[in-house]
Amino acid sequence: MQGDVLMADAPVAFEERADKSLLIVDDDRPFSTRLARAMEARGYQVRVAESVAEGLTAIESEAPAFAVIDMRLGDGNGLDVIERLKKSRPEARGVILTGYGNIATAVTAVKMGAFDYLAKPADADEIHAALMAIPGERATPPENPMSADRVRWEHIQRVYELCGRNVSETARRLNMHRRTLQRILAKRAPR
């Protein structure tokens, strides 16, 4: 009998949660359809929204236990959806996905309540692992870590964002010539 009481008081692992409702908010229909099928196969009850407005409406009607939200949507920013989710259901876990990843937006996403931040293309296994991760658990090292060029680019992007996208101010703070900075900003992110 006493063992039963101890079991009841033990925290429930995320894998064993009864409520595995999942909201996917992404305007890339082929991606969200594939992800929805893959997550349903993992036991989630999935709803899909294609815009910030649809995501907010879905949360108002029934806030999910989990969410996978694209950062950039046609009608706004996915951070608005994660913020509403955390207000409606503080224990919910939301993961932000983006094809435009940089450190500044990752930090902002986590401050707004995202549990994790993944760069696209992220597969269902990575997303499931992020949703089920134990807080404070040490992440496994990436198979393909960022190159030194990518780290430099990320730092420049972060300073650029913090300077309000002002090229002259960013160049001054980075002790870099303005034209050099403009050339870097015009290029795609290194791999």
Image (tube, helix red, strand yellow):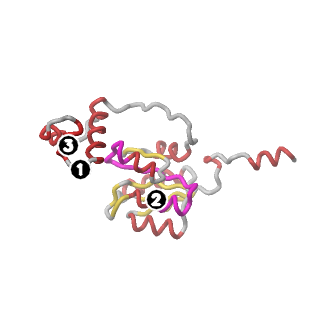
CA gap between label 1 and label 3 equals 10 Å
The image quadrant where one finds the C terminus is top left
Is 84 covered by the magenta stretch? yes
- Residue at the (54%, 60%) spot, across then down: 64
Please name the residue that numbered disc 3 is placed on: 185
Q: Where residue 191 is drawn, which disc sits there?
A: none
Question: Is the residue under label 3 in contact with that under label 2 (CB below 8 Å)?
Answer: no
In terms of secondary structure, where does tag 3 sit? helix
Q: Where residue 165 is drawn, which disc sits there?
A: 1
- Tell which of 54 and 106 is nearer to you: 106
CA gap between label 2 and label 1 equals 24 Å
Is 172 covered by the magenta stretch? no
Q: Earlier in the sequence, mark 2 or mark 1?
A: 2
**Extreme-right residue of the structure:** 1
Q: Position of residue 147 (x, y in %)?
A: 31, 30
Q: Where residue 83 is drawn, which disc sits there?
A: 2
Instruction: Say which amino acid is labelled 2.
Output: Glu
Q: Position of residue 171 (x, y in %)?
A: 19, 40
- 148 on left or right of 15: left
Q: Earlier in the sequence, mark 2 or mark 3?
A: 2
The part of the chain drawn in magenta is: 82-105
Q: Earlier in the sequence, mark 1 or mark 3?
A: 1
Instruction: Say which amino acid is labelled 3.
Output: Leu
Q: Quadrant of residue 151?
A: top left
Disc nearest the viewer among 2 and 1: 1
In terms of secondary structure, where does tag 1 sit? loop
**Extreme-left residue of the structure:** 179
Instruction: Say which amino acid is labelled 1.
Output: Arg
Q: Position of residue 139 (x, y in %)?
A: 50, 35
- 172 on left or right of 23: left
- Residue at the (49%, 32%) spot, across then down: 140
